Amino acid sequence: MAEAPWVTWLGDDFTGSAAVMEVLHFAGLPSVLFTDIPSPELAARFADCRGVGIATTARSHDPAWMVQNLPALFGWLDRLRAPILHYKICSTFDSSPVSGSIGAAIELGLQVRSAKAVPLLTAAPQMRRYQAFGHLFAGTLDGVFRLDRHPVMSRHPVTPMLEADLLRHLAAQTDLPSALIDLEGLADPRALQDALASGAGILSIDSMDPVSETAAGRLLWENRADLGFVAGSQGVEYALVRHWQDSGMIPRVDPPGPVSRADRIVAMSGSVSPTTARQLDWAGRNGFALLPFDARAVTCSDADQTAEETRLTQAAIAAAEAGQSPLVHSAAGEGQQVEAFRAALARSGMEAGTANRRIGESLGRILDATLRATGIRRAVISGGDTSGHGMRQLGLSALTALAPTIPGAALCRAFGDGAHDGLEIALKGGQMGSEDYFGWIRDGGGSREAT
């Protein structure tokens, strides 16, 4: 019988779920990410993995959807007997009481895996996500910002972050009492017991640097019998890996190198982030064909949506045949594309979440058709929600990490029963990556000294 995994995780989006897998895999711990509860035959192929996850699109759904969908997924993962069951959230805490509620997910997880309290570790210093005295900070290409002053997250169209104190933000999503283990508390052996004695059900944990990250990992692992259900970003796995390495449980290993360069790739982007806008600009000057997707089509009839998909598929195939890498995008920052879409959305009366799902599904169908027609075997989907909805259209069941890029956006190998089995694909959050990210994936990934 295979040894139980060390960590299992349920992700609220696809990009973050893949990021957890890469942290473990590149630390020498074979890991797999499933896109749903796998068949017994598929699960058996990965029986020796130390990390096992399932990706969802929970970040874009309401608590009612979570009640219907998350318990069975938590239950399957819990039955794998890993000492830590992790609900993976976005490292910028994207959530609200009505969309991607972290509080609702924690309550559902506790119904499956009981715990004296739920550690909440959101920071991931490797990704320039820092938490100090309860407040979250996030880096961009222009610097590091407190979350409520972040140029993207403070104005997020679905989950604007108006509060950097994560427990204050979370209080609108759950009635569970909470406590903070801050930077000083991480060095105090009494802090955890004091927090538990106070009746706290959620424990927000600071992390700023290797020292505090290692301390956080040690707290999680050494108290896993009592704190076996954890919420947080891939910072959970970064912290655990540091502790496992420092304690001698696992050796330090070098990350894998790049894979071979592809002459062309196919990319889809549904992100409105200014980071993605810069990446699109770079791509347009470096061998990519930028193909705007008119998102207004998803607010109209199914026929209008299908017509736009057909137009873009034909344009993408033509670009590939001309030697370019097609890059279909629904936005290039907060520009005219977004303004036109929002006006059409207001006229239609359609809910924003429905429209965003339809955009992701359209981009996924365009990607599917383009890959089939051209035979190209490497792809990128940019945008956290877009990645989830788009991946569903490809008929893929599992991912393993293949080659690193920036933390949280590795090139992966995909598995499925259809035409895309073996596809190399990267899933990138909108705010993630260097300006030449799309070219980096085309070149085969591989770590760099500085990014």
Image (cartoon, rainbow, N blue to C red):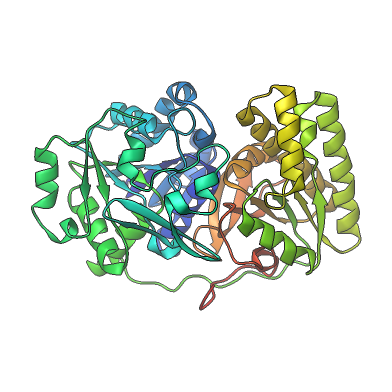
Up/down of 30 relative to 4, above or below? below
> Measured from the top left, where is residue 437 in percent x and y?
64, 64
Residue drawn 70% across the image and 65% down it: 442
> Measured from the top left, where is residue 259 in percent x and y?
63, 69
Between 265 and 272, the one nearer to me in the picture: 272
Name which quarter of the figure residue 213 lies in: bottom left
Q: Is residue 276 visible?
A: yes
Q: Outermost residue toward the bottom?
A: 449
Q: Is residue 82 visible?
A: no
Up/down of 302 relative to 210, above or below? above
Name which quarter of the figure residue 239 lies in: bottom left
Residue drawn 70% across the image and 27% down it: 346
In this rendering, position of residue 267 left or right of residue 213: right
> Measured from the top left, where is residue 206 in percent x and y?
28, 55
Name which quarter of the figure residue 244 lies in: bottom left
Residue drawn 22% across the image and 66% down it: 247
Q: Quadrant of the N terminus?
A: top left
> Measured from the top left, where is residue 354 in percent x and y?
64, 28
Residue drawn 48% across the image and 58% down it: 22
Between 30 and 266, the one nearer to me in the picture: 266
